[in-house]
Image: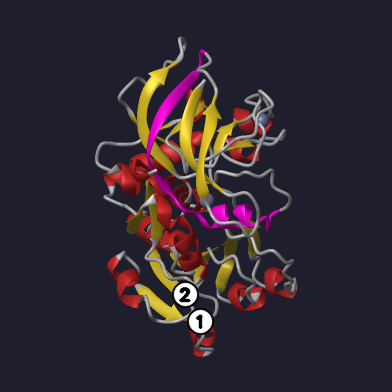
Amino acid sequence: MIIAKARAVDGPDKPFRVAEIKRRDLDSNDVLIEIKYAGICHSDIHTAHGEWGPVNYPLVPGHEIAGIVTDIGSNVKKHKVGDRVGVGCMVDSCGECENCRKGEEQYCLKGNIQTYASVDKYGEPTQGGYSTHIVVQEDFVLRIPDGIGLDAAAPLLCAGITTYSPLNHWKAGAGQKVAVVGMGGLGHMAVQLAHAMGADVTVLSQSLKKKEDGLQLGADHYYATSNPETFEKLAGTFDLIINTVSAKINLDAYLGLLSLDGTLVNVGAPAEPLSLSIINLIGHRRSFAGSMIGGIRETQEMLDFCAEHNIVPKIEVISADQIDKAYERVLASDVKYRFVIDISTM
Ligand SMILES: [Zn+2]
Ligand SMILES: [Zn+2]
């Protein structure tokens, strides 16, 4: 058994504390990773605060993990000691259902095993990346291309794939008009990815505060949604809108921005139900859709795509003692654009 140093929370309102967690001995297909960096995702905060249902505390969040392989099981074929690797939101799935066989393990019909706050096939609770080591079966370990630093790679494992997958699925590319709603951790990745895919990219943000960053990351246009004229001016414009905002939005206003056959995809998950007027869909054969992270094959494809196009998140590296403060700042939208924990400070 391996003992990892970690940061854990003991309840919805509790601060992070130093903890030691057990990682299982390597099974034949397992990889031991020494974690170097872990990103802070908004989902970590929702889960740590118990907002997405009951949690078995203590909890170690973190599903944007980048590190180095330090040991492998006897049967591991895909990774070797010294490899630069990453782990995202999932660490296992059934591997047999229709969706797993398609490489869409995130939609495993038996439920994928999440990196933290799940129970693994050994009956043990999973604990995430705010820790020095993790053991993961090799199929769920990604290769990080040489061109991407491990600190910048971490957020790609959730923020990167969450936005890449819908852009890829709905075929964002040359000749397409894509809008990105929200210019946060997810949004600033979506802008870069859609631009690299060749689409004409528009950011729809509450204000124009981050306009310069948006344009520099590859946006062609930038509008404030606080200005009602934006919705008049852009009516019927977009083939695809990626909504990264998890707060409640006026769906009808955004659906009105879609062209014929356009699709509005939610990747954020608002806590309350949203309503929309169906007439807004049928009048222009529009779709309203959702998308959740991406499969393992697609995640590798995304990492390779980012390396090829020099796409990296903008990050602020923090020490392990700054996690509570970082959570406050994420909730206040005061981050440009992703916090990454330097695990050497653990
Ligand atoms: Zn995440
Ligand atoms: Zn499955």
Q: Which mark is residue 194?
A: none
At 48% from the left and 65% from the top, the residue drawn is 330
Discs 2, 1 touching: Cβ within 8 Å = yes
Left or right: 92 in relation to 305: right
Task: Between residue 205 and residue 26, name the one nearer to us.
Answer: 26
At 52% from the left and 49% from the top, the residue drawn is 17
Dot 2 or dot 1: first in sequence order is 2
Query: In this figure, which residue is indicated by the disc labeled 2?
Result: 204
- Residue 169 appears in the picture as rendered: no
Q: x, y percentage for residue 207?
A: 44, 82
Q: x, y percentage for residue 204?
A: 47, 74
Question: Seen from this angle, which residue lies furthest front?
Answer: 18
- The quadrant in which residue 33 appears is top left
Task: Between residue 119 and residue 159, name the one nearer to us.
Answer: 119
Query: Disc 1 on helix, strand or loop?
Result: loop
Left or right: 228 in relation to 306: right
Q: x, y percentage for residue 64?
A: 46, 45
**Crowdedness near tag 2: few (<14), some (14–19) or many (≥20) residues, C-alpha within 10 Å:** many
Q: Quadrant of ligand 2?
A: top right
Left or right: 269 in relation to 53: left
| 175 is higher (above) or lower (below) than 34 | below
Question: Seen from this angle, which residue lies furthest left?
Answer: 147
Q: Is residue 45 magenta?
A: yes
Q: Is residue 50 magenta?
A: yes
Query: In this figure, which residue is indicated by the disc labeled 1?
Result: 225
Q: Which residues are magenta?
A: 28-52
The scheme the figure's colours follow is secondary structure
At 49% from the left and 59% from the top, the residue drawn is 324
Three-letter residue code for mark 2: Leu
| 20 is higher (above) or lower (below) than 247 | above
